[in-house]
Image (cartoon, rainbow, N blue to C red):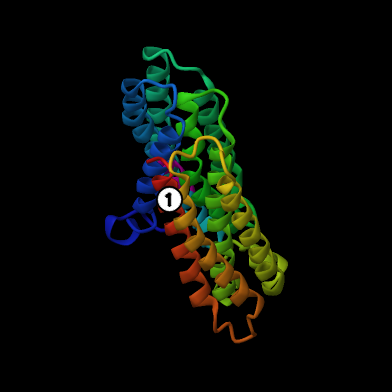
Amino acid sequence: MRKISIKNDIIDLKPVIWIKAIFMVIIGLETTRVGIGIGRVNINIYFGSFIFALIAISGIFVVFLLKDKDRDKNARRISDHKLVITFSTVFYGLAFGLAIYHTIAYNLESLNLYLLAFFGIFWFLTLYYGRDWKYKGILRNVIISISFSFGLIYGASLNYTLIPTIIYLYFGALFLLKISKYLINDCKHLERDDREIFNSITSIIGEEKARKLSIILDILVIIFLIIPMFPGFPNIFAQSLYIYVTLAAIIFICLAAFLSFRMNNERKFYRIVKIFLRCAMFIAFTAFILANF
């Protein structure tokens, strides 16, 4: 396994995911702020965003370990493995310790601790068993996707024990949209993935089925985005803004799904589909923010 270096690996540690995680927590908190004092909401923002950013960093270190591409297991640098595990454990430990203080000091419900414990168990199993799994590409994509999108649920859990439906719809839309983009990306680089020790979902089920799965996920995302448009849907403070902006995201998703359906063997549309899905994710993210005004 390659050594960790700032020059070669800072991009692999995906700082953008940490930033997204912070915004997801804030959106989750702002969406569930009704009936919660502004002082309590602000405290939850300060603590919650920092805590979940640490969780995201811990998760990216887990992904970093899964990127071991050496075919000869005996050639692995055990010291590097231990270093990555140590970093992941330290960041998670800091996050969970701070979450305990936050919960006790401000008399919060313990749901947020259970959610963080779920991440701890997931990270632990992945660190010690996932790196030897044949299909590490699946874990990699899921961990990256959940490391920021789950911030919506975590943020909401700081305000309420009973998390509203809108949060699950937001989470489902972003998580599935990210997975759909990964499927298209894997299709684009299928030959490259076949040479790596870990296999992507596409290399398992085949390029054609991966495209169909991406289309199915796109349809589910559209459904999740449309449901909050129904009149009087709870926890939507600016429904008109949400509808107008979300319609733009849906258009991009429909275009991506259509091009995926019309894809040919030359893979000429993969780049465009990725751009459309990336635009849809950014616009949907913007719609979630505007819905809180």
Residue 83 seen in the figure: no
From the top left corner, tell me how far across and down residue 75 is, in percent: 50, 58
In the rendered image, the vertical position of residue 8 relative to residue 123, given as above or below: below
From the top left corner, tell me how far across and down residue 238 is, in percent: 43, 43
In the rendered image, the vertical position of residue 151 relative to residue 215, given as above or below: above
What is the number of callouts on the image? 1
Q: Quadrant of the N terminus?
A: bottom left
Residue density around tag 1, few if under 14, some if 14–19, many if 20 or more, within 10 Å: some
Q: Residue at x 59, y 46 (%)?
A: 230
Is 126 on the left-hand or right-hand side of 203?
Answer: left
Nearer-the-camera pick, 89 or 37 = 37
Q: Quadrant of the C terminus?
A: top left
From the top left corner, tell me how far across and down residue 7 is, in percent: 27, 60
At label 1, the amino acid type is: Leu
Residue 275 seen in the figure: yes
Residue receiving disc 1 = 241
Nearer-the-camera pick, 116 or 132 = 116
From the top left corner, tell me how far across and down residue 8 is, in percent: 32, 61
Q: Residue at x 61, y 63 (%)?
A: 200
The quadrant holding residue 84 is: top left
Q: Which residues are magenta?
A: 56-62
Secondary element at tag 1: helix
Q: Residue furthest left?
A: 7
Nearer-the-camera pick, 94 or 109 = 109
Give the main secondary structure, helix, strand or loop, of the magenta stretch.
helix
Nearer-the-camera pick, 210 or 42 = 42
Is 204 on the left-hand or right-hand side of 253?
Answer: right
Magenta highlight on residue 57:
yes
Q: Residue at x 55, y 65 (%)?
A: 253
Is 190 on the left-hand or right-hand side of 290?
Answer: right
